[in-house]
Image (cartoon, rainbow, N blue to C red):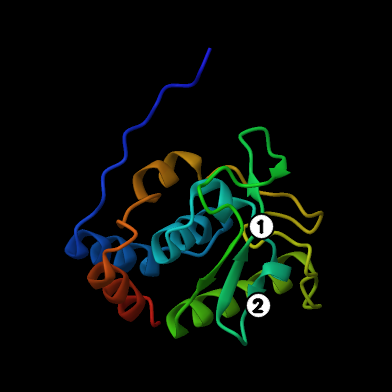
Amino acid sequence: MHPETVECHSLSAKQAVQRALDLKECERSSSIVAVWLALATGEHRGEALGLIWGNVGLVCKCIRVEKQLSSRGVRRNPKSRKPKRNLVIDDGAIVFLIEWKIMQSDLFYQGSDVPGNAPVCGNDANGGFTSSASPTMIIYAHAIEQNDREAVGAIGSVLGL
């Protein structure tokens, strides 16, 4: 038996900006970061949840999508049409991710470097991937149509922290 299908609708640029503002005000957690990544980059839920730090280029401003987290918590190849790809991220995304990486370092690694194989949306020092973002991700995943440059630009400017 297949799980219930959830219909996703794209947000308008105004709605996307409001969601970004809401997320910016939230206390940071692995779930908030996963939702933020999906909204800011257009990543699918599983791709955001399966992202590791080794695939985040803070200097080159890109994310390499290579794996996704399955509903069973296993990293696997993505199911999307372009499964392995690079996503360009803006300065706001860089700041957001750097702040989160510092928080992870303090929370899980006693201030030491976060390993490259650690999940970006991890919830512990043992490399545990979070799956608690799933209900919220349904609201935000696929939020912006891929070609809606106006909305993407608006999100980038709002998340410029």
Question: In the image, 18: left or right of 58?
Answer: left
Q: Amino acid at mark 1?
A: Glu
Q: Is residue 18 above or below residue 127?
A: below
Circle 1 Cα neighbour tier, 10 Å, few/some/many (<14 / 14–19 / ≥20): some
Which of the two residues, 113 or 67, is positioned nearer the viewer here? 67
Q: Is residue 158 above or below residue 68?
A: below
Front label number (2 vs 1):
1
Marks 2 and 1: CB-CB under 8 Å? no
Determine which residue is flagged by label 2: 102
Percent of width and height locating residue 151: 25, 68
Among the two numbered marks 2 and 1 on one chain, the one whose residue lies closer to the N terminus: 1
Which of the two residues, 90 or 86, is positioned nearer the viewer here? 86
Looking at this rendering, what residue extends furthest in the front direction? 81
Percent of width and height locating residue 84: 61, 58
Quadrant of the rendered image containing residue 124: bottom right
Percent of width and height locating residue 152: 31, 70
Which residue is depicted at the point 50% across and 41% down? Answer: 134
Percent of width and height locating residue 127: 78, 55
Q: Is residue 78 above or below residue 161?
A: above
Q: Amino acid at mark 2?
A: Ile
Q: Which mark is residue 66?
A: 1
Q: CA distance from mark 2 to mark 1?
A: 24 Å
Q: Is residue 86 above or below residue 84?
A: below
At mark 1, the secondary structure is loop
Which residue is depicted at the point 73% across and 69% down? Answer: 54
Quadrant of the rendered image containing residue 61: bottom right
Which of the two residues, 55 or 53, is positioned nearer the viewer here? 55
Circle 2 Cα neighbour tier, 10 Å, few/some/many (<14 / 14–19 / ≥20): some
Quadrant of the rendered image containing residue 153: bottom left
Question: In the image, 141: left or right of 1?
Answer: left
At mark 2, the secondary structure is helix
Which residue is depicted at the point 70% across and 59% down? Answer: 119
